Image (cartoon, rainbow, N blue to C red):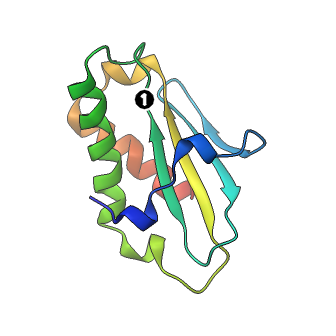
Amino acid sequence: MIARRNRVRVQFFPEKSRLISNDPFFSVRSAPNNLSFNRLGAVIGKRVFGSAVKRNGLKRKIFGVFALKPDFFKEGREGRDFVFFAKPGVRNLTGEKLLEQINQYVQLI
């Protein structure tokens, strides 16, 4: 899991943000945050997974991949907020494919 200061509250994420990736599984958006480090957020709606347990499990997987990359949150540069918006297609991904897909986004960022 990542530290609380490295998580962005999606309620305050600006609507005018840059689209980084858009595919059947996730939309990834980015916006400047006026801090010296990056932050990360995830939005998984009820139409993606009806169960809160499954939604939270997906969030933990997303945050877990980024927790293994501490240089993503390193201070000393212009910070940005990144938010993953899950789409219903993510239900069809197995665990291994899901981690592979998230790692592709890490490369884009």
Q: How many marks?
A: 1
Who is closer to the viewer here, 37 or 71?
Answer: 37
What residue is shown at x 34% (from left), y 66% (from top)?
3
Who is closer to the viewer here, 97 or 15?
Answer: 15
Q: Which residue is mark 1?
A: 44
Residue 66 place in picture, x, y as percent: 37, 60
What residue is shown at x 67% (from left), y 76% (from top)?
78
Secondary element at tag 1: loop
Residue 21 place in picture, x, y as percent: 61, 40
Above or below: residue 24 compared with residue 96: above
1 vs 8, left or right, is left
Please rate how many residues cluster around mark 1, counting C-alpha atoms within 10 Å: few if below 14, some from 14 to 19, many from 20.
many
8 vs 63, left or right, is right
Who is closer to the viewer here, 11 or 43?
Answer: 11
Residue furthest right as drawn: 16
Quarter of the image containing the C terminus?
A: bottom right
Above or below: residue 90 compared with residue 29: above
107 vs 97, left or right, is right
Quarter of the image containing the N terminus?
A: bottom left
Residue 106 place in picture, x, y as percent: 47, 56
In the image, what residue type sits under mark 1? Ile
Residue 33 place in picture, x, y as percent: 67, 63
